[in-house]
Amino acid sequence: MRCTRLEARRMLSHINENQQPQMVDISEKAVSDRRAVAEALIELPPVFQAYVQGGDLFLKKGPVVQTAIIAGTMAVKRTAEVIPFCHPLPITSCRFETDIESQESGLRIRLRCEVKTCDRTGVEMESLHGVAIAALTIYDMAKALSPHIVIREVRLLAKSGGKKTLGQYPLYGLVLTGGQSQRMGQAKALLDYYGEPHAQYLYNLLAQSCEQVFLSAQPNQWQGTPLADLPTLPDILPQIGPIAGILTALRAYPQVNWLVVACDLPYLTTETLAPLLHHYREDVVATCYHHPQEGFPEPLCAIYTPQALPVFEAAYAEGIYCPVKILQRSPCQRIAPPQPTITANINTPEEYHEALHHVRRP
Ligand SMILES: Nc1nc2c(ncn2[C@@H]2O[C@H](COP(=O)(O)OP(=O)(O)OP(=O)(O)O)[C@@H](O)[C@H]2O)c(=O)[nH]1
Ligand SMILES: [Mg+2]
């Protein structure tokens, strides 16, 4: 598989000019507050159920969950000693949340570890190391009673901090390109307003403020085109309009903010996107522009929070596929567009030729 230009640039910082691995140089990065949350699930057979008491599991070696938290906290502080290219960081907070669930099949212990620092790089390795060692400690404390213990789903739930985050979540970008462009008669994502395919232009624009950007498309839609190398999230739902792309993205990365834009918006620039980023709110489903005349919310130039996933799932289950309707019935923050044209989408060849006059000012 060919790697994208972005991946190539990222990979380069992990190797030196002699192709040897090295620690990424973060000397020039800005210091900022950073947070990461990781989770692990541990499954234990039914024999353990008799030992649960007040949120812990009391076995011969002692209180299992409490001991795991201590082990995990120590692990968090020593991550850089264990993982070769990990930077040592001052940990300003380390908190575990635990939950024991009793099921027919046995016990399920869920461990979450939230780590904070204020530094030049993130603490995701620290939170992952913390839950991994806490889970191994549970295994060690419990194995004498039964070795049939499974540690599963050690994963990162959230990471924030640095430039490309909003509130407590990282910002990801999605350029919707999965439509059929029937009215245009040619792919809208490939139209040229600024000297390159417009989806490429929007990808670059979003990459200025987003940690990762994806094209939302049909599987293999852009093979053999200039967009082929861009990271893509292929729809996992039928081609029922933009909701298919938005829901695919929300499901794939539920713990991020999504800046979603349609590929047929020619007037988006750093300046016209700035108010959305500036007015972002975490306690709503989306922050979006409203249409100056009609007054409805524009869902295809908006920032969605993780709250959008259950809202879109419910709408999809009810057969409501129109994103405008979904936003109209959800708590969202609408802001006035700095220019009325920002939300103008271009659907026909006539509109395209007209728009070219406006975007290419001398
Ligand atoms: N991922 C994804 N994006 C879609 C889908 N349908 C439409 N879009 C995108 O959503 C945005 C708005 O859609 P429309 O204006 O209807 O665009 P379109 O469907 O390509 O154009 P028409 O065929 O003329 O309706 C565009 O950026 C489309 O590429 C879909 O099923 N999946
Ligand atoms: Mg359409």
Image (cartoon, rainbow, N blue to C red):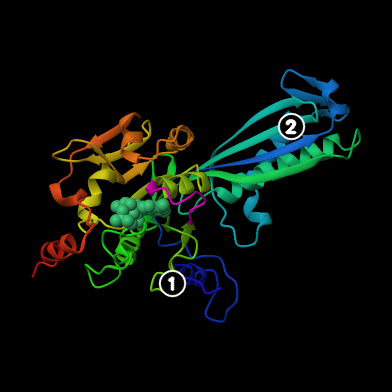
Magenta segment's dominant SS is: loop
Residue 341, image x, y percentages: 15, 51
Does the stretch in magenta take in 235? Answer: yes
- Horizontal placement of 77 versus 253: left or right? right
Question: Residue 263's quadrant in the figure?
Answer: bottom left
Q: Nearer the viewer, residue 155 or 242?
A: 242
On the rendered structure, is 11 left or right of 343?
right
- x, y percentage for residue 5? 43, 72
Give the CA distance from mark 2 to mark 1.
Answer: 42 Å
Q: Which residues are magenta?
A: 234-242
Q: Which residue is mark 2?
A: 108
- Specify few, some or many for label 1: CA neighbours under 10 Å numbering under 14, 14-19, or 20 or more: few
Residue depicted at x 13% and y 47%: 340
Q: Who is closer to the viewer here, 356 or 194?
A: 356
Amino acid at the residue labelled 1:
Arg
Does the residue tagged 2 have its C-beta within 8 Å of any atom of ligand 1? no
State whether residue 157 is above or below residue 54.
Answer: below
Quarter holding the N terminus is bottom right
Amino acid of disc 2: Arg
Q: Indicate which disc residue 5 carries.
A: 1
Q: Earlier in the sequence, mark 2 or mark 1?
A: 1
Residue 247 percent coordinates (x, y): 46, 44
Q: Residue at x 21, y 48 (%)?
A: 343
Q: Is residue 171 above or below residue 181?
A: above
Q: Secondary structure at mark 1?
A: helix
Looking at the image, the residue that sits furthest to the top is: 54
